Image (tube, helix red, strand yellow):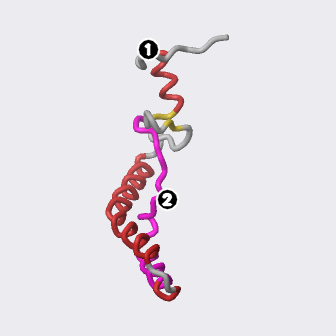
């Protein structure tokens, strides 16, 4: 299981991303509408003003149950290990262990 401090840090990044999402979208839309280079540079400077951790690229997808950062399935928001355990315990409908 991931350390609780890392999970809390990730939640803080998610809150920041939601807070500044509309601001970033409006600046990007404005940048696409402006044609002069000087105006685009000014908008680009404004785009750099929010905190770095508010950027969507800094978010890490984690398992909801364990907080594991790798091998996550987007549909379930769980790691592969947890999905495997749930499939073996017959908790996932329609999932069977493959054998050939």
Secondary structure found at label 1: loop
Residue at 35% x, 66% y is 20
Q: Residues within 10 Å of mark 1 (few under 14, many from 20)?
A: few
- Examine the structure image and report whether residue 49 is included in the region drawn in magenta: yes
**Left or right: 76, with 80 as reference point:** left
- Residue 26: image location, x then y, percent: 36, 70
| Numbered badge on residue 58 | 2
- Residue 77: image location, x then y, percent: 43, 37
Residue at 53% x, 31% y is 80
**Left or right: 99, with 86 as reference point:** right
- Residue 91: image location, x then y, percent: 40, 18
Residue that mark 1 sits on: 90
Q: Are marks 2 and 1 in contact (CB under 8 Å)?
A: no
Front residue of this view, candidates 97 and 21: 21
Secondary structure found at label 2: helix
Residue at 46% x, 73% y is 32
Front residue of this view, candidates 95 and 85: 95
| Numbered badge on residue 77 | none
- Examine the structure image and report whether residue 1 is included in the region drawn in magenta: no
Front residue of this view, candidates 56 and 44: 44
- Per the rendered image, the range of residues in magenta is 40-66
> Which quarter shows the C terminus?
top right
């Amino acid at each position: 299981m991931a350390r609780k401090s890392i999970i809390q840090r990730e939640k803080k990044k998610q809150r920041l991303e939601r807070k500044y999402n509309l601001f970033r979208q409006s600046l990007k839309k404005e940048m696409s509408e402006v044609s002069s280079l000087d105006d685009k540079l000014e908008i680009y400077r404004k785009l750099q003003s929010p905190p770095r951790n508010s950027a969507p690229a800094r978010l890490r997808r984690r398992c909801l149950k364990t907080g594991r950062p790798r091998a996550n399935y987007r549909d379930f928001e769980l790691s592969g290990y947890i999905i495997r355990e749930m499939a073996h315990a017959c908790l996932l409908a329609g999932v069977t262990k493959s054998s050939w």
